[in-house]
Amino acid sequence: MSQGVKMRVKIGVELEYRLAQPGPVLLMLEAAGAGGQDLRSTAIDFGRVEHLARVPGEEGIGERIILRAADHIRCRYDAEVAISRGCPDLAGLAADQVDEMPGDALRYLLSSRYCQAERFVSFATQRFGDLEGGAKVQAIRDWVEQRLDYVPGVSTASTTAADTFLERRGVCRDYAHLMIALCRAAQIPARIASVYAPPVEPPDFHAVVEVYLQGGWHLVDPTGMARADQMALIAVGRDATDVAFMTTMTAAEMVSQEVRVTAG
Amino acid sequence: MSQGVKMRVKIGVELEYRLAQPGPVLLMLEAAGAGGQDLRSTAIDFGRVEHLARVPGEEGIGERIILRAADHIRCRYDAEVAISRGCPDLAGLAADQVDEMPGDALRYLLSSRYCQAERFVSFATQRFGDLEGGAKVQAIRDWVEQRLDYVPGVSTASTTAADTFLERRGVCRDYAHLMIALCRAAQIPARIASVYAPPVEPPDFHAVVEVYLQGGWHLVDPTGMARADQMALIAVGRDATDVAFMTTMTAAEMVSQEVRVTAG
Amino acid sequence: MSQGVKMRVKIGVELEYRLAQPGPVLLMLEAAGAGGQDLRSTAIDFGRVEHLARVPGEEGIGERIILRAADHIRCRYDAEVAISRGCPDLAGLAADQVDEMPGDALRYLLSSRYCQAERFVSFATQRFGDLEGGAKVQAIRDWVEQRLDYVPGVSTASTTAADTFLERRGVCRDYAHLMIALCRAAQIPARIASVYAPPVEPPDFHAVVEVYLQGGWHLVDPTGMARADQMALIAVGRDATDVAFMTTMTAAEMVSQEVRVTAG
Amino acid sequence: MSQGVKMRVKIGVELEYRLAQPGPVLLMLEAAGAGGQDLRSTAIDFGRVEHLARVPGEEGIGERIILRAADHIRCRYDAEVAISRGCPDLAGLAADQVDEMPGDALRYLLSSRYCQAERFVSFATQRFGDLEGGAKVQAIRDWVEQRLDYVPGVSTASTTAADTFLERRGVCRDYAHLMIALCRAAQIPARIASVYAPPVEPPDFHAVVEVYLQGGWHLVDPTGMARADQMALIAVGRDATDVAFMTTMTAAEMVSQEVRVTAG
């Protein structure tokens, strides 16, 4: 393995969906060419589509693909990504002053659909008010992992951080939303990141958190499944809306979907 | 009046807030140097503050000011803006294909906290499905104006487009959120814009809608109070979260607030 | 068929559920001995249970069965019910004055979990304000049937009348909640009723509405599937919470469930 | 003071409201003739009204008054109540088996609009799962009092127990709803009670909780302001909807309201 490469991640995705009616489909599933990772190979094939376009993802990370399709979309994606980022020791990182943050960090202090930060201020102060910076982030992460049960099928596309805080269970996206809401309530910018990570079992699109500490963004997984040096980053955003691997404007029915992620 | 200038807008804002505890305050209240308007004069004064910074607003429109203050913030802002943009004939504008939109438009098709577009798809199809492009936008705008009653004090910071759709009343921000949700549900990018506009009575920060038609953004007021050539644009964003004139991280109590907006 | 009997309804239910842990189970699935219907035969068998009790249903209509079970519940229920009630001509019935209603009607003017009547007042006035009494109820019923699409699987146990009003689709319970909320908003007492009705296809527990007009309660089906003279009433209540055929305190997994309802 | 009387409570209420349009008004503000308290004197005067009726409150406790008024309602109520009930030692009371409860208790295990018990099951099990019966109720009460801040003005008529659980603040009604939701989630019947209690400062209608333990209902105040032997009970119900001191069908504006409650 070349110097600085912590892990190679091999990704294979095959998916097929049937559309209720013709219309555009947004896809966001390719590993990004971004800080801390290099694309060693990448190939994506959609079969026959009427039209295909690409636009940059949020913060210029990754790309969103827009397909116009008649009634089906099929996609096969294969890539290999070399990860060189390390794992941050969160507890040792300092928080930035809000008035010294760049606009691209400041934006991630604001509430968003699934992460209504202002509703969490009282609780965050009660529970984590004595801690500072990275130590506070670490405590929030640990609290989320300990208090939630990982239960597929109980949360839906409308489940928010407030719901998860109450119901104490969910999947990776719910863990991420709750940690993000708590960090923002504590004045620490936090955003969602979609990644591929070999330890995630069964392999699937995985949602984690990026927090802004000491002038930079750091990947953290509140489910505890993966470390930052095991993650191939796809996209970032305010919450799940921005990083959905597929967004359709009309009803879409899954025909098949397979995701393979291995450490190479 | 120089050629092409439709209106001069004179703005005066004085506000004072008391903070429950020291902390950062985000302000977004200066008219932007943006398409269709020129700043003829601008002056802003905050008295004594601990620290002040500026970051660009969403889409690079306007600026967000970040203050660090001990217990009070005071702000006096005076400006004169020359508006040269015209009023679009919405009904004559065509909608763009989703797969031909730039990323900066595509983003405003997605749901956001106050504008949960996907929940409106059935209704938007039932009611406006026979129309296309700008004619559909015009029909949505008219429907919102006709169905809602302008009633101050009934909506709160948590009122969403879904709430307003049911309760049929609200203020400018609620009108804007409902129109945005309906446009997005109809695959037309829409975002919120905060403006100063002389016809708004009593003078105040005013929220309107920008829709993306025929390759550009067009200002529309679902309350019917102001025309595009009467608006001095401050900021744009996904919904009210992005364009709030003031965001504090802790409780803030208004001491005084005065907004004057006149056509000069 | 004896005089006055409009229809005989034969009911057969078999269900088996697995409980995640031992605990009480509430069941409400027997046709009630209530106005407008007579039980010709009834038999219910639970196999072996630890304990079984019965308490009256809301308003003294029907009975709630409470089982204590170790890990499984099995139930077989067979009955024959003779329906003698007629079908009201709603439009010809007068509304009662609120201050002349008995307490048992007044209660059903208040908002409940799934039927937040006060939020519907503006819309109900806008849309149905010109009508009175039974004619208003008929118009509300027709509006609900016309505006909603019957789509299984899109609503959940947390879907309210407000959600259904926006999303324009759902199942019988959602139709009932929306009609109830609108009637209450118009000062007409309305409650949910669970029934068996032969025309419902596929056969299942069915939720309809009872409205209070001209001194009495009248069954109406906003889905248009069944008439009042085809309904074997099980229970009534404020909304779905009160008439659920099964309520468990812990997770329960369906092993099998079959409902047969035929006109005899 | 006669034997067994713990406290005499003198109550004086004067209120005046202006109605936006003629319509019925429901009032529930007289101390009930109920277990543990005796009415020593009572007088109520409404001035001139078009019509007045009374119906029993929920569970036959207290009475609901229905007025038909043109544009104003005025009410003057004076009473003296002798309280003979004692203060339960909650921790020493046993919980009843669900399958041995009467229907009037069982009803208060179900979720209601402001107390969505089933959403609290995971948390209640995590936090209070090791406790039983009255000791569990006592721990829930203490947790609610300790975790919430009493802050007037932050909650509204739509604030639920789920909201309060997150936002950690509210008034008596919010404390009551949260305690009720947690008790029901732990299979202990709980309902709201409206009372007058001298220690409440400033004097006002006060909301507390009744829990069903060891075959009977017991008054508890999660705000810690009042003891059971200091409460003059007005009404009980599933949640705030059932015990509101005033319910109007159209907008009502307060002209004046004064509540005096003293220990005599």
Image (cartoon, coloured by chain):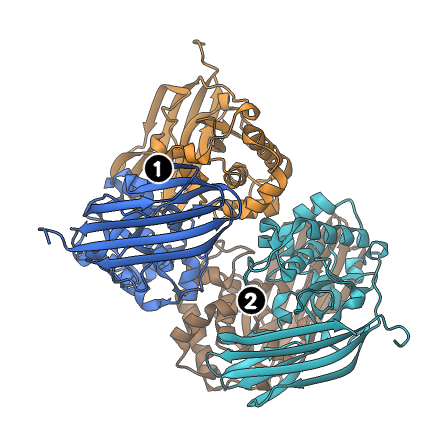
Chain colours: A blue, B orange, C cyan, D brown
Write down the quadrant of residue B68 in the picture.
top left
Vertical comparison of C116 with A67: above or below:
below
Query: What residue lies at 34% left-to-right and 49% top-to-bottom?
Result: A76
Give the image location of residue D48, x and y in percent: 79, 55
Vertical comparison of C120 with B143: above or below:
below
- Count numbered badges in the picture: 2
Q: Residue furthest front?
A: A48
Q: In the picture, which quadrant includes the C terminus of chain C?
A: bottom right
Chain at tag 2: D
Residue B2 falls left or right of residue B169: left
On residue D207, the disc is: 2
In the foreground, A233 or B18: A233
Badge 1 is on which residue? Answer: A54
Query: What residue lies at 44% left-to-right and 21% top-to-bottom?
Result: B10
Write down the quadrant of residue A88 in the picture.
bottom left
Give the image location of residue B236, x and y in percent: 41, 33
Query: What residue lies at 76% left-to-right and 68% top-to-bottom?
Result: C231
In the foreground, D45 or D99: D99
Q: Are marks 1 and 2 on the same chain?
A: no
Q: Residue furthest left?
A: A3
Residue B158 falls left or right of residue D23: left
Vertical comparison of D84 with D250: above or below:
below
